[in-house]
């Protein structure tokens, strides 16, 4: 028998709840004392994230040990109790073949609210997915905070920036370690609030305020879906018995097991409704079509915010939600049957939509923003076709190269283009004065486009390969086309920024506010601005094409860093030593370069953590992150904290009940062999927490096909850029200036498919405005009228009570008693004559009367 201490969880796993708590406390310290500290609170934010990174690294190491021990010792090891967790023994399948042992999350929670049999805990539930995300968020946030020390130096709200950034990361950490949906919602909403504060950090500029509001309210649509979805699953798993609710309806592990249990309460419509509502939340949070419109507007915040928001926190929260409760989507959308799921359709559309919009952006940050939209589409495509591991792996690799690209763009703005992000006006030729920034940009771009051996090659190609392997031929080609488009628009951005002749600020021309005058003039269709855009489009259609931009239109307001540079808010300068007016384009300081060099290193090598084509020994993410699809006994308890536990209640299915029928298309049936978790009802007394997934075996032909497509796209993009942008001393122009037939498509993309106008005219004007008007009428004519009438009645009642009760009764009684006393005094005044004989006669008379009274009383 294996000694119990062999599989001890360890301090880091058992205390992983500190990973989210420490930054939350850091936020409180920065808010209260930050302005009085030497670095204005930055040291607290950096220190708290460093502590979280240390604990998350220790937790990752101990999770690897835990998984290796379970794999080495099978049932014996998996059945041992350690710390606050209990590893459930695997259920051996018929025929004597035991699946991979189930490694249960290490759960440490405390009850923070309890009432009428319901209790909600808060703490940590650490499994492979949580370990990966905890380390990733802490690592990326720490580097971005170090970068921000220099980039945001001198900002008027420097302390508040670090406070919001720290709380933002804390919200994501709280969410990914959640043991129940209530804590997940808590972390989800903390991120939503902080994103509003960070995007609108420079709220004095109206465009920034509007961008923050747009992001906040668009994401609120998804939040409604999250609340509705959680409610459907909670009451559905409780069989709608509102008089006898079980808290396990909020427990994530119980939800996973319930979805795969074949229980009668997990009917198709309940799972479909719950999955659809939760996916609305994912669409809103992760910028999927058609709610992707807020994501580029989030560029109004400082560049470090853009890097964090687009890499490892808020925008991947929706993808994480789908991955975390994947059994609900697996069963609800029938992902296992080989059919085209709703998730896959939305993901495929988002890939193309985001890539097309990236082609027409002149703002370098918005190119990267739409690139993020497209890459999130890949993640959703993978989840919608059963490639769970590929989606999670792409979250991991994407975080490194996308944060590196954003921070490199910030470095260019900070030291090369005088806080401008306009590639056509203020960049060009920057590879020579900024060699380090150029190098890390190239590395991250190659990773993003999926070039061997960079990180994106391993993760993106794994998605495309699995999509094709599972029989989704059309979506396979969508993924390849998206990869080619990525190579093309990133080549354009690279050429405009680092090659050619320096332009504008890159050439030493400091034109202050006029650099964005045209952007504000040619405002695109955002809320309340569609009339301006239509006027600009009409002018261009009449031949009013401005020099140096493809049609003269640009995005609304540009990225958020520029207006404050023009206003003299030296948020990115080195407070004098790094002043752009004096030095011109130059390499950034070390506090900016060190983080992006580290990220570039991971953009190059992180893909080898799951390099499937190299063999099983390289599949570390698969081994330690992907949950095990094993039937486990349910006559145990899932620990929820020291001395507390919640029974995992999954009804025993009757023999033969809930057997799966045919599995749709032949391709899907081949890739998803019937049998196992997610395909058959678990054996009585057992439960599944994750469905059985198949993984594509990479082939040389598919690898070369993907590399060939990307290489061809690079060749076409380079040729195009040299042809149209490579002429010396010539203004930049594009195809839309040479071909009127292409101008309509350009304007269609430049105005973002007119979705903002659609939302403004249909949703806001046709829905929100009537509702607002109705509420206003109700307020004015019902609530205010009622209040006025009540006030008037109260006033009249008060007057009557004053006249009758106060004046006549209360004051009358007081005045009457005084009057009686006064009259009595006047009546008795004659007795006070001062004559002794009179006083003696009165006393004698009084004594006589008293004696007579006594006699009468005694006689009677």
Image (cartoon, rainbow, N blue to C red):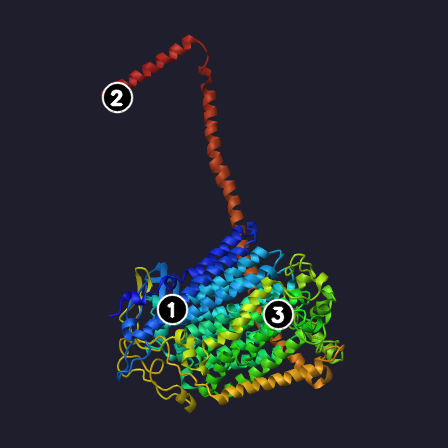
**Front: mark 3 or 1:** 3
Residue denoted by label 3: 437
**Front: mark 1 or 2:** 1
Q: Where does the image place residue 171, in percent across and percent down from the top left?
A: 48, 63
Determine the residue positioned at 33% across, 75% down.
71
Q: Disc 1 to disc 2, how far (Cα)? A: 104 Å
Which residue is farthest bottom? 666
Q: Disc 3 to disc 1, how far (Cα)? A: 36 Å
How many other residues sit within 10 Å of disc 3, few (<14), some (14-19) or many (≥20)? Answer: many
Q: Where does the image place residue 817, in percent across and percent down from the top left?
A: 45, 29
Q: Quadrant of the C terminus?
A: top left
Q: Earlier in the sequence, mark 1 or mark 2?
A: 1
Q: Is residue 371 left or right of residue 607?
A: right
Determine the residue positioned at 54% across, 59% down.
164
Residue denoted by label 2: 857
How many other residues sit within 10 Å of disc 2, few (<14), some (14-19) or many (≥20)? Answer: few
Q: Earlier in the sequence, mark 3 or mark 2?
A: 3
Q: Quadrant of residue 491?
A: bottom right
Residue denoted by label 1: 63
Nearer to the camera, 473 or 126 = 126
Task: For mark 2, give the secondary structure.
Answer: helix
């Amino acid at each position: 028998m294996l000694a119990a201490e062999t599989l001890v969880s360890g301090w880091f796993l058992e205390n992983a709840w500190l990973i989210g708590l420490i930054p939350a406390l850091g936020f409180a310290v920065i808010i209260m004392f930050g302005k009085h500290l030497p670095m204005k609170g930055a040291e607290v934010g950096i220190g708290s994230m460093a502590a979280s990174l240390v604990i998350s690294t220790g937790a990752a190491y101990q999770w690897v040990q835990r998984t290796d021990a379970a794999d080495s010792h099978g049932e014996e090891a998996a059945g041992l109790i350690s710390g606050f967790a209990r590893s459930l023994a695997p259920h051996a399948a018929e025929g004597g073949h035991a699946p991979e042992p189930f490694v249960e999350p290490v759960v440490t929670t405390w009850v923070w609210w309890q009432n009428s049999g319901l209790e909600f805990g808060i703490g940590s539930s650490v499994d492979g997915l949580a370990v990966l995300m905890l380390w990733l968020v802490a690592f990326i946030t720490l580097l971005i905070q170090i970068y921000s020390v220099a980039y945001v130096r001198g900002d008027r709200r420097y302390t508040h920036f670090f406070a919001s950034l720290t709380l933002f990361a804390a919200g994501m950490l709280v969410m990914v370690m959640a043991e129940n949906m209530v804590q997940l919602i808590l972390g989800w909403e903390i991120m939503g609030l902080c994103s509003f504060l960070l995007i609108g950090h420079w709220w004095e500029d109206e465009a920034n305020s509007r961008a923050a509001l747009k992001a906040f309210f668009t994401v609120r649509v998804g939040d409604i879906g999250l609340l509705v979805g959680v409610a459907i699953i909670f009451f559905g798993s409780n069989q709608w018995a509102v008089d006898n609710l079980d808290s396990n309806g909020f427990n994530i592990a119980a939800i996973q097991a319930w979805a795969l249990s074949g229980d009668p309460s997990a009917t198709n419509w309940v799972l479909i409704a719950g999955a659809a509502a939760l996916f609305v939340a994912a669409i809103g949070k992760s910028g999927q079509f058609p709610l992707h419109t807020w994501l580029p507007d989030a560029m109004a915040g400082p560049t470090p915010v853009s890097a964090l928001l687009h890499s490892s926190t808020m925008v991947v929260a929706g993808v994480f939600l789908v991955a975390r409760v994947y059994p609900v989507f697996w069963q609800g959308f029938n992902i296992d049957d080989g059919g085209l799921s709703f998730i896959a359709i939305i993901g495929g559309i988002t890939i193309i939509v985001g890539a097309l919009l990236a082609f027409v952006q002149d703002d370098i940050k918005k190119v990267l923003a739409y690139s993020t939209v497209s890459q999130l589409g890949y993640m959703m495509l993978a989840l919608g076709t059963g490639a769970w591991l590929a989606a999670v792996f792409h979250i991991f690799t994407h975080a490194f190269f996308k944060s590196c690209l954003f921070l490199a763009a910030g470095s260019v703005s900070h030291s090369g283009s005088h806080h401008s992000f306009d590639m056509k006006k203020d960049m060009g030729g920057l590879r020579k004065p900024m060699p380090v920034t150029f190098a890390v940009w190239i590395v991250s771009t190659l990773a993003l486009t999926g070039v061997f051996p960079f990180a994106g090659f391993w993760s993106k190609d794994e998605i495309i390969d699995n999509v094709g392997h599972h029989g989704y031929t059309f979506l396979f080609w969508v993924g390849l086309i998206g990869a080619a488009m990525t190579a093309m628009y990133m080549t354009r951005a690279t050429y405009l920024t680092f090659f050619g002749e320096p332009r504008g600020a890159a050439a030493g021309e400091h034109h202050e506010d006029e650099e964005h005058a045209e952007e504000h003039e040619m405002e695109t269709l955002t809320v309340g601005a569609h009339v301006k855009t239509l006027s600009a489009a009409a002018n261009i259609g009449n031949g009013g094409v401005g020099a140096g931009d493809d049609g003269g239109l640009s995005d609304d307001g540009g990225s958020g860093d520029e207006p404050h540079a023009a206003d003299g808010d030296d948020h990115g300068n080195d407070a004098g030593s790094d002043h752009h007016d004096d030095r011109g384009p130059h390499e950034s300081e070390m506090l900016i370069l060190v983080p992006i060099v580290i990220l570039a290193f991971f953009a190059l090598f992180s893909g080898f953590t799951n390099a499937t084509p190299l063999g099983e020994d390289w599949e570390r993410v698969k081994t330690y992150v992907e949950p095990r699809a094993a039937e486990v006994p349910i006559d145990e308890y899932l620990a929820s904290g020291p001395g507390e536990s919640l029974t995992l209640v999954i009804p025993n299915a009757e023999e033969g009940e809930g057997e799966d029928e045919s599995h749709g298309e032949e391709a899907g049936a081949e890739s998803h062999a019937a049998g196992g978790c997610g395909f058959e009802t678990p054996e009585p007394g057992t439960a599944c927490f994750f469905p059985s997934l198949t993984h594509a075996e990479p082939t040389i032909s598919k690898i070369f096909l993907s590399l060939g497509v990307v290489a061809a796209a690079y060749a076409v993009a380079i040729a195009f850029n040299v042809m149209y942008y490579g002429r010396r001393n010539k203004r930049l122009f594009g195809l839309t200036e040479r071909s009127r037939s292409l101008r309509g498509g350009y304007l269609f993309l430049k105005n973002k498919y007119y979705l903002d106008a659609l939302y403004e005219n249909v949703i806001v004007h046709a829905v929100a405005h009537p509702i607002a008007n109705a509420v206003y009428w109700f307020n004015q004519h019902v609530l205010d009228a009622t209040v006025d009438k009540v006030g008037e009645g109260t006033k009249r009642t008060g007057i009557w009570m004053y006249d009758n009760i106060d004046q006549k009764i209360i004051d009358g009684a007081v005045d009457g008693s005084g009057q009686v006393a006064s009259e009595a005094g006047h009546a008795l005044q004659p007795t006070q004559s001062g004559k002794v004989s009179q006083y003696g006669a009165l006393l004698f008379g009084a004594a006589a009367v008293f004696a007579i009274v006594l006699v009468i009383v005694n006689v009677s």
